[in-house]
Image (cartoon, rainbow, N blue to C red):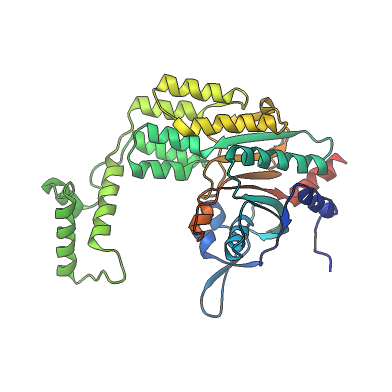
């Protein structure tokens, strides 16, 4: 039985993916919800269609393919490297278009040459789109979460703030709000009189004393920790909150972050620009910059011209599992995203893999490709 609303070019697209040395896989439409709620990112989480099993287990309609393909790889105990291709329906609440639509793509798992795999993901996505949209000029925007992480770490911010900023990468509004908060910390008194009293007594500075105080207070009030956090957990979180609230980003560091996030230029010029920024700011970007330079070289080896790609330092994609490369492809002069992807080296371990598996991939939106194809006809 033919699939409803599957574009006529789908068989040719499947052939494109197979020609790239991939293995076609499918995954169940009904998926366990927990991995998506934990790892997919706030933007996707709020658009998931949830349901429940007879036993009360949280389930959802498949909102994307990366997590299901990775889970399948782990469950089948297949060795790496492996290149999986997929084409099927995904289900998301969307502001425009149907909530049920088709995606295709490639997940490249276990390739040890990270730069080569990154370059292959970008070049493969472009090649597939070029085959399906002959004559349509495409624009590629590339970002790198690991470079942003390196810049934030080099600025010397507390670990809690580093985590918050990295989590917001790619969400311009949230990132700007966090930086505004860093430049103007919340006034004293936001934690209530008891915490303020502990701060005055100096108990927040001594973790052992603080834990003992919380333990005594919980016993006195009859509060049970059996199904909740321990005094040590509460103390650690309380000290972290106080540290976050009391951290103020000095004007120089704030200016450095803003200068970095404003970088937007040809990818061909990006390595030199990043090196110059790091030198001027007195920051060591270490391996992140080396990996970035290696990826640009690998793209050249793959036959791409970095001068045709835009590097945007603030560019990210709204999925929490990305760790390095992120990219999107649109028709030139049109914000409609036809393909997007990136690197997600931590994801398989978080999903239960016994060893670290480097991974990169991309997805194609078939309904959007069809609309561009129709407009160009």
- Across and down, in percent, residue 165 comes to 43, 41
Say which residue appears at 66% left-offset and 32% top-offset. 299
- Across and down, in percent, residue 82 comes to 65, 53
Residue found farthest to the right: 377
126 in relation to 310, above or below: below
- Nearest the eye: 227 or 96: 227
Residue found farthest to the front: 79
- Across and down, in percent, residue 136 comes to 80, 36
41 in relation to 35, above or below: above
Q: Is residue 41 visible?
A: no
**Count of numbered marks:** 0
- Nearest the eye: 25 or 357: 357
Say which residue appears at 54% left-offset and 21% top-offset. 272
192 in relation to 325, above or below: below
Q: Is residue 314 visible?
A: yes
Picture quadrant of residue 373: top right
- Quadrant including the N terminus: bottom right
Residue found farthest to the left: 201
- Across and down, in percent, residue 11 comes to 83, 55
- Quadrant including the C terminus: top right
- Nearest the eye: 33 or 68: 68
């Amino acid at each position: 039985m033919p699939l409803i609303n599957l574009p006529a070019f789908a068989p040719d697209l499947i052939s494109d993916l197979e020609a790239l040395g991939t293995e076609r896989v499918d995954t169940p439409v009904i998926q366990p919800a927990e991995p998506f709620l934990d790892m997919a990112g706030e933007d996707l989480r709020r658009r998931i269609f949830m349901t429940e099993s007879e036993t009360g287990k949280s389930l959802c309609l498949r909102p994307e393919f990366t997590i299901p393909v990775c889970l399948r790889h782990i469950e089948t105990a297949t060795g790496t490297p492996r290149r999986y291709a997929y084409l099927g329906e995904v289900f998301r609440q969307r502001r425009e278009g149907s909530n049920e639509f088709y995606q295709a793509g490639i997940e490249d798992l276990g390739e040890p040459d990270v730069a080569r795999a990154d370059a292959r993901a970008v070049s493969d996505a472009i090649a597939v789109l070029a085959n399906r949209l002959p004559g349509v000029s495409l624009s590629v925007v590339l970002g790198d979460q690991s470079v942003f992480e390196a810049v934030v770490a080099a600025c010397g911010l507390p670990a809690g703030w580093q985590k918050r900023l990295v989590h917001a990468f790619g969400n311009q509004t949230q990132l700007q709000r966090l930086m505004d908060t860093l430049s103007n910390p919340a006034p004293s008194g936001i934690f209530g009189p008891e915490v303020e009293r502990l701060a005055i007594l100096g108990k927040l500075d001594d973790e052992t004393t603080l834990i003992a105080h919380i333990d005594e207070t919980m016993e006195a009030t009859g509060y049970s920790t059996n199904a909740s956090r321990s005094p040590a957990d509460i103390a650690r979180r309380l000290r972290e909150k106080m540290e976050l609230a009391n951290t103020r980003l000095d004007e120089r560091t704030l200016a450095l972050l803003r200068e970095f996030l404003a970088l937007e230029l040809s990818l061909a010029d990006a390595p030199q620009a990043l090196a110059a920024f790091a030198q001027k700011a007195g920051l060591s970007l270490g391996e992140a910059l080396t990996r970035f330079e290696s990826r640009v070289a690998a793209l050249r080896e793959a036959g791409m011209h970095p001068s045709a790609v835009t590097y945007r330092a603030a560019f990210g994609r709204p999925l929490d599992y990305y760790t390095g490369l992120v990219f999107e492809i649109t028709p030139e002069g049109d914000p409609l995203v036809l393909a997007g992807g990136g690197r997600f080296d931590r994801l398989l371990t978080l999903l239960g893999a016994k060893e670290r598996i480097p991974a990169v991939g991309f997805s194609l939106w078939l309904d959007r490709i069809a609309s561009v194809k129709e407009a160009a006809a």
